[in-house]
Amino acid sequence: MSRAFNFSAGPAVLPETVLQQAAAEMLDWHGSGMSVMEMSHRGPEFTSIIKQAQADLRELLAVPDNYKVLFMQGGAIAENAIVPLNLLGKNPKVDFVETGSWSTKTIAETRRYGDVNIAASSFDASATQGRYTSIPDVASWKLRSDAAYLHLCGNETIDGVEFHQWPDMERLGASNVPMVVDMSSHILSRPIDVSKFGLIYAGAQKNIGPAGLTIVIVREDLLDQAHALCPSAFTYKTVAANESMYNTPPTYAIYIAGLVFQWIRSEGGVAAMHARNGEKAEMLYETIDSSELYVNHVRRDCRSYMNVPFFLTDERLNEAFLAGAKERGLLQLKGHKSVGGMRASIYNAMSVQGVEALVQYLGDFEHERG
Ligand SMILES: *Cc1c(COP(=O)(O)O)cnc(C)c1O
């Protein structure tokens, strides 16, 4: 059996060595006589797994001591409610910069809990392809210096727009406003300075591990502004006080995530990931830009290293393109239903060889059909 190159946006490809290790340990984890799935979450075996995963994640992102790392459930869409329930108990004001489909979705959910101000938006209603293709110029952002937080989506998984530089809140006159960032689709793809953020959240199924696990990294001083009606299992302070064991955590997903953290460490950490991700992305964008058949509309300075959406200039060829890709073992290249076209997600676990195979196919298909 051979493994295909899987360009799914999520749940997404995992490192092969991680899957092999999980398979080898499936029936009997480290001589315990049990699968990780069968263990008590409070027993010594699983306690060692979750502690190691926490420590590795902290080390990979150099998380400062005044931040809590939480393993939660519900995914990023649940966080769209859990974040305001935790942070708007005292001050309802939230600013947003809208850069794509996911920030738009977060805005809609946050309106149920808070006083939302869209400080800037790159939405282009007149575009037929690519309605979000840039990040609004920072100088145009209309931030409120007394907002409870500013929300950004660091990488717009559907539209392929990524922040390669983070705003300087001090220069924007909002130095006391914490940045809250949905990093679901690019966490661990590159180094970040965690101290610049108030809160980071990410569903695991893009760049970390199986669906079902949500990572939250939150500055300790933000733990005291939860709304009274925030469910206990979703109250960061409660989850933190119980070491992510207030309720039963997604144990198997945490175990796999831990193996992925060790894999990233063995590959040289997030700086090495970033270098390789840049190489992969540049190769793909260059192929698209130099062709007549493929087009990507995103402004160059905010093109995502993780998700590369593109369109065929002759959309009648879409079906043939996808069928030919599948024949070569290049899977899940269809774009998100809301935007159409194609999308290649090239997360950490997508190898350079996978992107090379895609680039080869793009050229061959254009040569034959374009
Ligand atoms: C996938 C994704 C989500 C949604 O994640 P769920 O696990 O379905 O809740 C939210 N934000 C971003 C940026 C994503 O990529």
Image: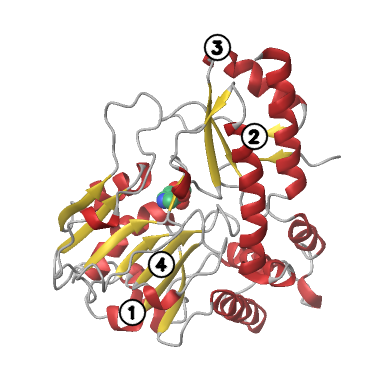
Question: x, y percentage for residue 57?
Answer: 57, 74
Query: In the image, what residue type sits under mark 4?
Result: Ile
3 or 2: tag closer to the N-terminus: 2
4 or 3: tag closer to the N-terminus: 4
Ligand 1 lies under 8 Å from the Cβ of mark 2: no
1 or 4: tag closer to the N-terminus: 4
Q: Are marks 3 and 2 in contact (CB under 8 Å)?
A: no
The quadrant holding residue 5 is: top right
Query: In the image, what residue type sits under mark 3?
Result: Arg
Q: Residues within 10 Å of mark 3 (few under 14, many from 20)?
A: few
CA–CA distance between discs 4 and 2?
33 Å
Query: In the image, what residue type sits under mark 2?
Result: Thr
Rendered-image quadrant of the C terminus: top right
4 or 2: tag closer to the N-terminus: 4
Q: Nearer the viewer, residue 306 or 13?
A: 306
240 shown above or below 199: below
What residue would you read off at disc 2? 287
Rendered-image quadrant of the N terminus: top right
Query: For the point 80% across and 58% down, which residue is it?
Result: 20
What residue would you read off at disc 3? 316
CA–CA distance between discs 3 and 2?
21 Å
Q: Nearer the viewer, residue 98 or 250?
A: 98
The furthest residue to the bottom: 65
What residue would you read off at disc 1? 237
